[in-house]
Amino acid sequence: MLQNKNCWIFLISLVLGAGACKFSAPISAVSLKWAFNNFSKLDTVNPILTPNTSSIFFCPIQNANLHWESKNVLNPTALVKNGKVYLIYRAQDSSMTSRLGLAISEDGMHFKKSGAPIFYPAKDSFYKYEWKGGVEDPRIVSTPDGGYLLTYTSYDGKTARLCFATSIDLMHWEKRGPVLKSDRYINTWSKSGAVVVERMGENMVAKKINGKYWMYFGDTDLFMAYSTDLLHWEALENEESKKLVSVLAPRAGFFDSRLVEPGPYALYTKQGIVLIYNSSNAANNNDISLPKYTYAAGQALFDTSMPYKLLDRSKTYFIHPDKNYELIGEVNNVCFVEGLVYFKNKWILYYGTADSKIAMAVAQP
């Protein structure tokens, strides 16, 4: 029935013409009761953001004007504020330095960019972590006090570090530094922090579980960090080995055989904590239906009282590259999901395509 329903949506959009919202066929073969299902790529508007060679920004480190989003735009996070969708996206200049830009939409489909980045490397105490690679791959959630917490990856050209920042207005940010500050982890590779949230209307608010906030992170296996105040984080470790606890790992023979990496926030629901995750297909022992190294996204379910306990996991991807702008770009064969909003009674997914552009998909009611 679901497939027939989406076929009718597609046919109706053709009849209505180019002015209608034209959806592609359903992306997903996932049919788990707890998972996000029935996402369709919005062909009429995709890609929704592309590089801009005319945007100019004065870099405080280089002391010069530069075209800060001339090379690629990719991997956005998103939230709803005052009836609008705010998209915070990664942008690269010709030197491949990354900064974060802001785009705003009244309808969730058509966005107006700000002229300059809202978050970027500067001559501050975090310069050593952020230059020259920049700040990458944001993920944003609301905090219980009405503010915002942004996790991002700082890259010095050698080591990626999972960092975070806070704001009360999305424009002015206080950098808080690496999530894992201890000597054990400060110089180890870490990235991609997805905080557990609960939906409050259209707002995604960080959720305390047994007195702690929780965050999934990593880009090989998935690991976890926890905090009592959203400011001071500790890694979840095995008490005996003092090593990070892997809560989700790649699977030989599947689309996620090479690596797994968090997508947007992790959503607390009655069924469990739903985590959309990105993955890569290995060169061998992989999903033979996809080219090697293809980035596609799956979903996992964790226990609501023990966020580190895996309950269920999709056997296949629910989004994968099949459009030209997803197949060819800075990195070929990539759909990388980082933005998810509940806007005007529907779920909208925002994702990077081939590390070059940004697209969207909508879950049909």
Image (cartoon, helix red, strand yellow):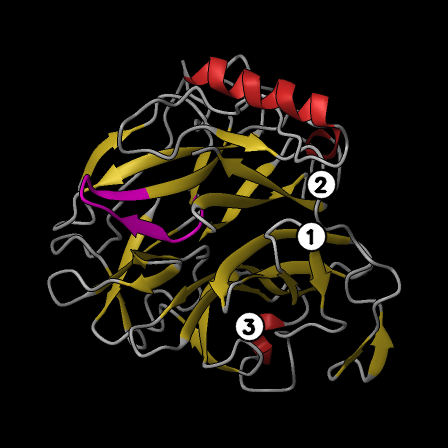
Q: Which mark is residue 45?
A: 2
Of residue 2 and residue 215, the one placed in the foreground of this image is: 2
**Residue on which disc 1 sits:** 110
Residue 46 appears at what percent x and percent y?
70, 39
Q: Which mark is residue 312?
A: none
| Quadrant of image for the N terminus | top left
Of residue 26 and residue 167, the one placed in the foreground of this image is: 26
The amino acid beneath tag 3 is Tyr
- Residue at 83%, 68% in the rendered image: 55
182 vs 15: above or below: below
Q: Earlier in the sequence, mark 1 or mark 3?
A: 1
**Residue on which disc 3 sits:** 129
| Residue 334 visible here | yes
Front of the two marks 2 and 3? 2
Residue 100 colored in magenta in the image: no
Give the distance between the C-alpha atoms of the residues marked 2 and 3, in whole angstroms.
Answer: 36 Å
The image quadrant that residue 11 belongs to is: top right
The segment highlighted magenta reads 262-274
How many dots with numbers? Answer: 3
Residue 138 appears at what percent x and percent y?
52, 60
Q: Secondary structure at mark 2?
A: loop
Question: Going by the image, does 66 lie left or right of 283?
Answer: right
